[in-house]
Structure formats: structure tokens, C-alpha cells
Amino acid sequence: MNLTDIIPGNQRAHNVQRVGDIAQHKQLIEQEFVGKPRVCAEVAKCIIHIRRNDQREQHVNLLTDMLQKHTQLFVNNSDIRWLVSVCDTIVDTGTPEQRSTAMIISNFVNLLKLWDTSVDIMHNTEFCNQRTAVYKPKPLWAGAITFSIRDGDMVHNMMRRINSCVKTDPLLLAIWRRVMVLLRDSDLTLNRMQWLHSSKNFWIEP
């Protein structure tokens, strides 16, 4: 099996849900990667085995080997879902240093998902320029205050610190760089806030 080969097919599936039978699940999940290099599907299949504790050690070793040999091919052809799945798997199975770094990336993306889910469910997603122009930070909870939309440096500093942490691991650095590109080009609430910001760039290249 050549991991650089493109998976054939006419239509790509999206967000395939778990099924009880592992073989069936793996067959279905491959349809998410039509038109992509085979390594992407094989990484996903390894994760399925690991999550179900099926020959766990064997598949952890296989996953590690594939990611080391085909880092950029996998990263460049993966979406947020599978990049974060790899990070979550590293949190579960990696070295202490890897686990800490992978958790930073996973938590960052998951908090953005929670944020935009809450906006989608409960709030109007349109920003009002008049309101943000005069917005002043105010207390939230337990001593925290809201973000200063026009000139706050919290996001800039957070990104700078994440960049510093991920630089210690080549695989996670590659994943983080790809995650940043995908997030920067997406319709995030965070990006709408960036448009209103006066000085600091949120997306600092590591």
C-alpha cells in the first residue's frame, strides 16, 4: 500500500458517524478522503482502533510512524477535524512533552467551536461598529474582564505563547501552522473581532 497514492472516487463524504463494527466504520471513513493521499485515511483508521482500544499499542506505533514519515503530506491535506483528532490522540498516547503541547492546540480549537456554537444558538452574529467603537471592558466572573475589542493584546499574547510552546515538536508545529491557516481563512467570530481591532495581529506565524 502506497500512502502517497490518491484515494479514488467521485464523491467525498463528510463527518461520517461512528458505527459499531470497526471494519465497516473504516470502510465508511475512507470516503471522507476521496481525492486525498491515502495516508490521511490510514491515520484516521489508526485513530479509530486506538479510541476503541483495539490492538492499541500496535496502532499507536503505526500512527507515529506514518506521521513521522509523511508529516507535511498529511498536514497539508487534512482539515481541522482530523488535525485535532491527531492532537487528541497524542494527548492520550504521547510523551509528557507532546501531550502538553497537543492539548494546547486541541483546547484552542475546541474553545473556538464552543464560542461559535454559543453565538450560533443564542446571539446575533452581526457586529455593530458603533457599539464596538465605544465598548469598554467590563467584569465577567471570578475577577475576569471582557476583551478590549479595539486594542486589547490578550489574543496576540496568547498566540505568541502557543507558538513558543509548539516549536519544541516538529509534528505539532506543522499541525499548528496548518490549523492557523484554516482558522484564519474561516468565518470565525474571532476573525470578525480581528477586523475591528486597531493594531495587534491575532494570527502570528510561529
Image (cartoon, rainbow, N blue to C red):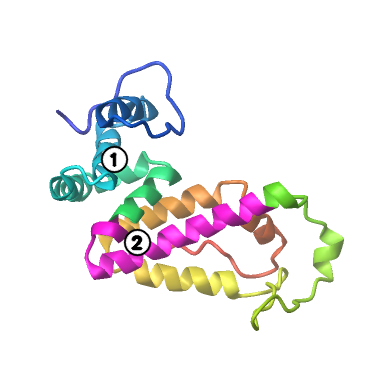
- Between 1 and 143, the residue placed more toward the observer is 143
User: Which quadrant does the C terminus fall into?
Assistant: bottom left
Secondary element at image label 2: helix
Q: Which mark is residue 48?
A: 1
Secondary element at image label 1: helix
Give percent across and percent down for residue 7: 29, 24
Residue where numbered disc 2 is placed: 102
Q: Pick out the residue farthest to the right.
A: 130
Q: Can the viewer see residue 175 in this picture?
A: yes
Give the vertical position of 16 relative to 89 (above or below). above
Give percent across and percent down for residue 53: 23, 46
Asked if labels 1 and 2 touch by Cβ distance under 8 angstroms, the answer is no
The CA span between labels 2 and 1 is: 18 Å
Give the vertical position of 135 relative to 78 (above or below). below
- Counting residues from the start of the chain, the first of labels 2 and 1 encountered is 1
Give the vertical position of 37 relative to 201 (above or below). above
Q: Give the range drawn in magenta.
A: 90-118
Q: Pick out the residue farthest to the front.
A: 20
Q: In which quarter of the image is residue 79?
A: top left
Q: Is residue 103 magenta?
A: yes
Q: Which mark is residue 100?
A: none
* Numbered disc total: 2
Q: Main secondary structure of the magenta part?
A: helix
User: Residue at the spot x=51%, y=72% of the render?
Assistant: 158
User: Residue at the spot x=31%, y=60% of the render?
Assistant: 91
- Left or right relative to 149: residue 66: left
Give percent across and percent down for residue 34: 36, 25
Amino acid identity at mark 1: Ile
